[in-house]
Image (cartoon, helix red, strand yellow):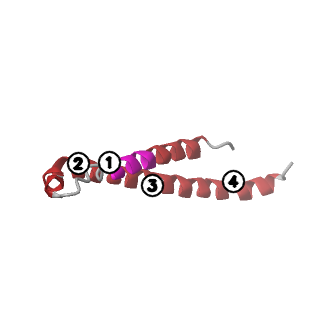
Amino acid sequence: MASPLRQLQTKPVITCLKSVLLTYTFVFCVLGIVLLAVGIWGRMSLAIYFSLLDEKPTNVPFVPVGVGTVVVLLGTFGCFTTCRGST
């Protein structure tokens, strides 16, 4: 069992680390939303330009949409995990 003085020294450090981790996962989630929005925008408004290409790479906008979705899910789970973390 740790002494009361030792507990007082570690609790602020853990709180600070949780705050930093929560900030990082929130920024990660926001960047995922931006990536998702860019992919949707590319799919909707750049379809005319994709039709001009000879190679027909119509799956290109789905890559940022898929990656953005995965990043948003991981960021959300990271925020929940950080907030719920055991004390």
Q: Are marks 1 and 3 in contact (CB under 8 Å)?
A: no
Which residue type carries mark 4? Answer: Lys
Q: Are marks 2 and 4 in contact (CB under 8 Å)?
A: no
- Separation (CA) of disc 1 from disc 4: 44 Å
Residue drawn at x 40%, y 50% is 67
The label on residue 11 is 4
The residue labelled by disc 2 is 43
| Residue located 76% across and 53% down the image | 7
| Dominant secondary structure of the residues highlighted in magenta in the image | helix
Horizontal side, residue 31 vs residue 13: left or right: left
Secondary structure at numbered mark 3: helix
Magenta residues (range) = 63-72
Horizontal and vertical percent for residue 13? 66, 59
The amino acid type of the residue labelled 1 equals Phe
Residue 74 rendering spot, x and y as whole percentages: 49, 46
Instruction: Give 2 or 50, whichever is nearer the viewer.
Output: 50
- Dot 2: what SS? helix
Which residue lies at the image location 32% right of the left edge and 48% below the top edge?
62
Q: Which residue is mark 1?
A: 62
The residue pinned by badge 3 equals 28
